[in-house]
Image (cartoon, rainbow, N blue to C red):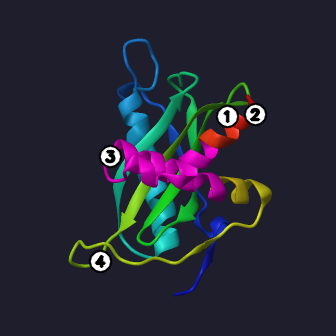
Amino acid sequence: MQEKYARESYTEMNELVLPNDTNTFGNLMGGRLLYWMDICAAMAAQKHCNNQVVTVSVDNVSFKRSIKLGEVVTIEAQVTRAFNTSVEVRMEIFAQNLPLGTKVKSNEAYYTFVSIDENDRPKAIPKLIPESDKEKTLFAEAMRRRELRLLLAGKLKPENATEIKNLVNLFEHKV
């Protein structure tokens, strides 16, 4: 199976925050943002997998700044690592006030998708090749995030979480 570069999965999506997207405070509702993020991340995952994908986990969603009515939401998504049948997608979300010319990071998150075949069974996917230093860092860290997701889901025993053990040992030696 042909390997693919991380940059090939890059996806950018823009949405204008309209009144029906906001709460009574004029802020974008979190659920609407999560919906848009799922769409954008799925497109990035499908670019990498060349196949249909399903969302299997949403984690580490950080809401750092509210997004206001009339702002433009820009979601940037890219695959950080490919496993056997799943991919991790990292997103950064920005809020733009077009009249003022401002663009501020408001959120970031990691979503995981599984590639599925015509019978809804997991399907093998291409390996990912990180190129830039940032891509290489995200690629290496993805294994720890994956182990943590599997631990929390009860699909991995703590004694088998080698990446997390290595991280804990690193912190213990620095303290």
Does 148 appear in magenta? yes
Alpha carbons under labels 4 and 1: distance apart: 44 Å
**Magenta residue span:** 139-167
> Is label 4 or label 1 in front?
1
Which amino acid is tagged 4?
A: Asp
Marks 2 and 3 close (CB-CB < 8 Å) = no
Q: Earlier in the sequence, mark 4 or mark 1?
A: 4
> Is label 4 or label 3 in front?
3
Which amino acid is tagged 3?
A: Ala
Rendered image: mark on residue 172: 1
Q: Residue at x 74, y 53 (%)?
A: 134
Rendered image: mark on residue 117: 4
Q: Is mark 3 on a helix, strand or loop?
A: loop
Q: Residue at x 48, y 35 (%)?
A: 61
Residue 114, image quadrant? bottom left
Rendered image: mark on residue 174: 2
Marks 4 and 3 close (CB-CB < 8 Å) = no
